[in-house]
Image: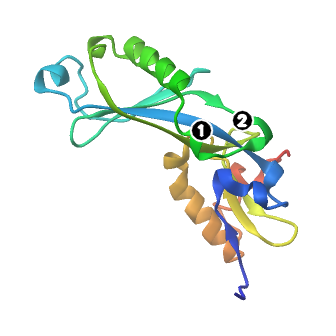
Amino acid sequence: ITAREVVMATNAWQDSFPDLANRQMPVWNHLMVSEPLTPDQLARVAWPGREGVANSLSFSTAARLTPDNRVLWAGGLWYYHASRQVRPEFVRNDEAYRALRASFGEFFPAWRDLRFAYANGGPISWSHTFIPQFGRTPNGLVYGHGYTGSGIAASHTGGKIIRDLVLRRENEYTDLAFVTVNQPK
């Protein structure tokens, strides 16, 4: 393959690329999804706009009400595995699920009786600045990583940043802190 530009958008899986490996760190984050709420259960908590909610505590969590009235509850502690390992067996983490379940009951006491049907985990890319990072490596690779658990909100802007880096445009997107801040290794 011959290409003028290459974009590395591998997020937590960048360890195999020497120019990028030390710019971010893979950590594991987990989530749970409840069984569908009954009309009685839905009525216990006022959530008229169905907005996503989050806190910014050290044990940060976020919630979303799905179209089929399930609660998605995510966050909690981040888990780092020795030597930056990303392995399938890390998906299941009973300690993480117990902690998430307890925090859910504190956040939504009216829903303490909710049952969770699904639980999952996956690696996210942690940046040393706690904000996504975009740029170009010394050998010319364009990269984006380090969403640090806030990827949905920043991904639209990230796409515009990567577009403009590939097209070598200098504008309001390539001048954002996502690109211009010191990116420690």
Q: Quadrant of residue 127?
A: top right
Against 167, is 14 above or below?
above
Circle 2: is it few (<14), some (14-19), or many (20+) Cα within 10 Å?
A: few
**Residue under pointer 1:** 90
Q: At 81% across and 72% down in the image, what residue appears? A: 140
Q: SS of the residue at dot 2?
A: loop
What percent of the width, then of the height, locates residue 50? 28, 35
Image location (x, y in percent) of residue 172: 64, 61
> Does 99 sit left or right of 137 as displayed?
left
Furthest-front residue in this view: 89
Indicate the position of residue 46 as horizontal and vertical percent values. Answer: 23, 21
Q: Secondary structure at mark 1?
A: helix
Residue closest to the eye, 155 or 116 = 116
Whichever of labels 2 and 1 marks the residue nearer the N terminus, that label is: 2
Instruction: Tell me, yes or no, whether the two marked residues, 2 and 1, touch with CB atoms within 8 Å.
Output: yes
- Identified by mark 1, the residue type is Phe
User: Which of the 4 quarters of the picture holds residue 161?
Assistant: bottom right
Q: Position of residue 55 (x, y in %)?
A: 50, 24
User: Which residue lies at the image location 75% right of the left edge and 47% below the top edge?
Assistant: 24
> Is residue 95 shown above or below 160?
above
Residue under label 2, please give it.
81
Depth check: 101 or 182 in front? 101
Three-letter amino acid code at disc 2? His
